[in-house]
Image: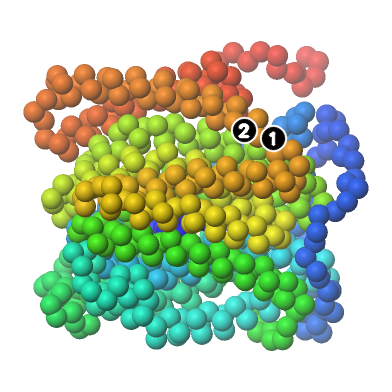
Amino acid sequence: MHEYRSPRTPGGRQAGPGGGPGPVPGGPRRPSAARPPVEPPTTRLPATPQARPRPAPEAEAPTQRIAPVPPTDPATGEGRSSLMRSSGVMAVASLVSRVTGFLRTLALVAVLGLGIVNDSYTVANTLPNIVYELLLGGVLTSVMIPLLVRAQTDDADGGVRYTRRLLTLTGVALLLATVVAMLAAPSLTRLYLGTQTSSSANPELATLFAFLLLPQIFFYGIGALLGAILNTRGVFGPFAWAPVLNNVVVLAVLGAYVAVPGQISLDPVRMGDAKLLVLGLGTTLGIVVQAVVLLPSMHRIGFRYRPVWGWDPRLTAAGGLAGWVVLYVLIGQAGYIVTTRVAADADAGSIATYTYAWLLLQVPYGVLGVSLLTALMPRMSRAAAEGRPHDVVADLSLGTRLSAVALIPITVLLTLFGTEVGVALFSLGAGGAGGGSARLGATLAASAFGLLPYAVTLLQLRVFYALTDSRTPTLIQLLIVGFKIPLLLLCPVLLAPEQVVLGLAAANALSFVFGAMLGQVLVRRRLGPARTGEMLGTIARTTAASVIGGALAYGVVALLDAGPLEGWAPVSRAWVGLAVALAVATPVTLLALRLLRVRELDPLWRRLPGPRRGRKRAGPR
């Protein structure tokens, strides 16, 4: 639904427990006496048309089927606690990935600055990330996971042959797409930037970067499909940790970039520049490593790849679903093209500022929201496949409420202290030149209110994908982009050139709010009562608690700025202000959440030391 490039730095869409095989989130457990019987549904949700292929003579022994995920028990909260444990463990891997990715972002700004070179690199990096968004954000994780789960359930060999055929055909398609994209690189950069060199990105330099970066398409796609296969087998860890290696490689590449003498030439632009080659090829190498590192995990789950050619009737259904996702991404790119053109005509560095503010906003979502989404997607897919719409809605409500508790306090702090975050983190090296770090922080603050709506919208889209409905998410995307483009075009009319990037970020965040509201209406129309009141109650209480903690922290920091911190260097003031804000806001917000009885935090309170009342004894003494 969003048209940005998904952050390459993080393990954004991946998460997993401890880096190794484990049970499916919410997997089978011993029966609970408190669990009420579940009535069989009178009707089943539409299933993807399937034809059971005959097992091939060379097929391996049937793969062990993955046990269905039981629904959340409202009496015991059994499904919820399992989900929270799974997503909590996965958050560790995602946290490391996000931290290393964040360090990579800081290093890029410190090395490249926020000027023409970084803008050109950012635009070229967007081109393979269109495919990243298409594959990881759409076709593979949202369309292929439900289809792979169904194949594992229905096929005599546990879906092995279907998976091999999918890998074979996908690999060929990705190779062709990579070649075509590289041939079309000049046209693609002109599409995003126009033909004239502006005060921002340089089209010729962006084109050369594109030649070096577009081969990532193949490795992004293969890595995404391998990750989807591992996730459906209950193995989340390797896919979560793989981006860490990518980030480490790029950090090493940036070190080599600094060590190489000379500068990237802008007039004329030359492919032979050593720094250009190091940066472009090194970035692509990181994606190669990110894909290749998944191969040992595929071997450990017992999967042996052998090419399987030919067509499966289920791939026709998958093609129809994927076609809608392709259209979804292309619609999003229309919005991104408008964004880059408006930013390129504004002030130098606006494209990079906009992109890095978005990447920074993705850090809390990647650590908390993505982990939750990764755990929920197989659950919702199985609930939809088994005709349990009430459980799909229950998972949507649970995911929304947990996202609210996790992300709203961060949203409030980023809104109040976004400028301090920018100055503290991006003033190193070339990033602090010309006030670029302060503007980046202000851009972050202007867009922070869209963090939760963004997470909720992605969760709502996963509901439709779990129902094997790719048409509705595409229509939602069309309406969101249609809502956003007029706002983007108004930014240079209403704002000064140096403020345009703030308006672009705010317009994008506002479109997420619109998308979340629209998505909830459509979920209700499709599945019936959507438990909207339950979600809004948690959001309202969490917002109130977060505002109390944030406002108190803002007042304390303002007093320090007017007193003891007056006259300090901007970076030192920013770091001290952020430390004080966290120290004040965190306990106050948690206390307010407890007083307002936000029950989604009950597992946290139970883990805290203290007297435990009403605890059942295991048996007589």
Query: Who's the residue at 62% across and 71% down the image?
Result: 323
Estimate the x, y position of residue 590 in percent, counting from the top left: 47, 22
Query: Who's the residue at 70% across and 14% down the image?
Result: 614
What amino acid type should be assigned to the residue bearing mark 2? Met
- Compared with 14, 171 (above or below) is below
User: Foreground: 548 or 586?
Assistant: 548
Instruction: Check the image and tell me how it is coloured.
Output: rainbow
User: Foreground: 227 or 296?
Assistant: 227
Label 1, label 2: how many angstroms apart (C-alpha)?
7 Å
What amino acid type should be assigned to the residue bearing mark 1? Arg
Residue 620 shown left or right of residue 247 in the figure: right
In which quadrant of the rendered view does residue 468 lie? bottom right
Estimate the x, y position of residue 192 in percent, counting from the top left: 35, 70
Residue 457 shown left or right of residue 618 in the figure: left
Query: Who's the residue at 82% across and 51% down the image?
Result: 387
Q: Is residue 573 visible?
A: yes
Whether the residues at callouts 1 and 2 have beta carbons within 8 Å, the answer is yes
Query: How many numbered discs?
Result: 2
- Compared with 489, 95 (above or below) is above
Q: Under tag 2, what secondary structure?
A: helix
Query: Who's the residue at 44% across and 65% down the image?
Result: 334
In which quadrant of the rendered view does residue 617 lie? top right
Q: Which residue is mark 2?
A: 535
Query: Callout 1: 10 Å neighbours few (<14), some, many (20+)?
Result: some
Residue 342 shown left or right of residue 82 in the figure: left
- The image quadrant where one finds the C terminus is top right
- Compared with 363, 577 (above or below) is above
Estimate the x, y position of residue 616 in percent, counting from the top left: 74, 18
Q: Which residue is mark 1?
A: 531
Query: Callout 2: 10 Å neighbours few (<14), some, many (20+)?
Result: some
